[in-house]
Image (tube, helix red, strand yellow):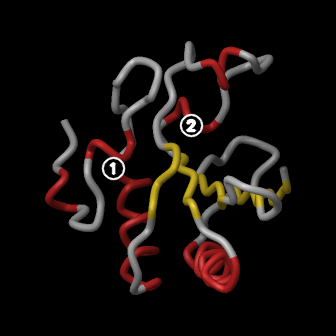
Amino acid sequence: MIDWAAYPNFSEHEFKCSHCGKVAMKPEFLQKLQELRVAFRKPIKISSGYRCPHHPIEAAKISPGAHTTGRAADIAVDGNDAFEILRLAFALGFTGIGVQQKGSGRFIHLDTLTVAPRPNVWSY
């Protein structure tokens, strides 16, 4: 059971799988995300948190991705705020950083996976 009071800038609702409604986030990931939020000093909008293996995005993959581990989230952000999120993510030791900064639906993916290839940065 997650003690959401430990992460005052986030709510359980933000991390629910849009397919099944489950929340299986890891407290150590949420703590790192909370540290990011405190350092950023602005609200952070989670566009995707936990995804069950049956979520359409995960089901389309050869094997389920980082979101199914409870150690990943996508943050809706662009422009100068995206630059600052990236700067802080590197400083805080996030190991997976994906960047989608073109078109609509811009976001930064962050995770704390340790399985190769990590650390890693990619674009969508």
Mark 1 residue crowding within 10 angstroms, few (<14) / some (14–19) / many (20+)? some
Q: Say which residue label 1 marks.
A: 27
- The residue at 36%/62% (across/down) is 31
Q: Label 1 vs label 2: CA separation? A: 14 Å
- Disc 1 versus disc 2: nearer the observer: 2
Identify the residue at image location x=47%, y=20%. Answer: 19
Comparing 7 with 103, the one in front is 103
Instruction: Check the picture and name the quadrant holding the N terminus.
Output: top left
Q: Is residue 71 above or below residue 100?
A: above
Residue 58, image x, y percentages: 65, 23
Q: Earlier in the sequence, mark 1 or mark 2?
A: 1
x and y percentages locating residue 46 in the rendered image: 46, 54
Q: Nearer the viewer, residue 37 or 117?
A: 37
Between residues 29 and 122, which one lies in front from this camera angle? Answer: 122
Q: Which mark is residue 53?
A: none
Amino acid at pointer 2:
His
Q: Residue at x 46, y 74 (%)?
A: 36
Say what secondary structure mark 1 lies in.
Answer: helix
Q: Residues within 10 Å of mark 2 (few under 14, many from 20)?
A: many
Residue beneath the point at 70% across and 79% down: 79
From the viewer's perspective, tell me whether residue 98 is left or right of residue 26.
right
Q: Which residue is mark 2?
A: 67
Amino acid type of disc 1? Pro
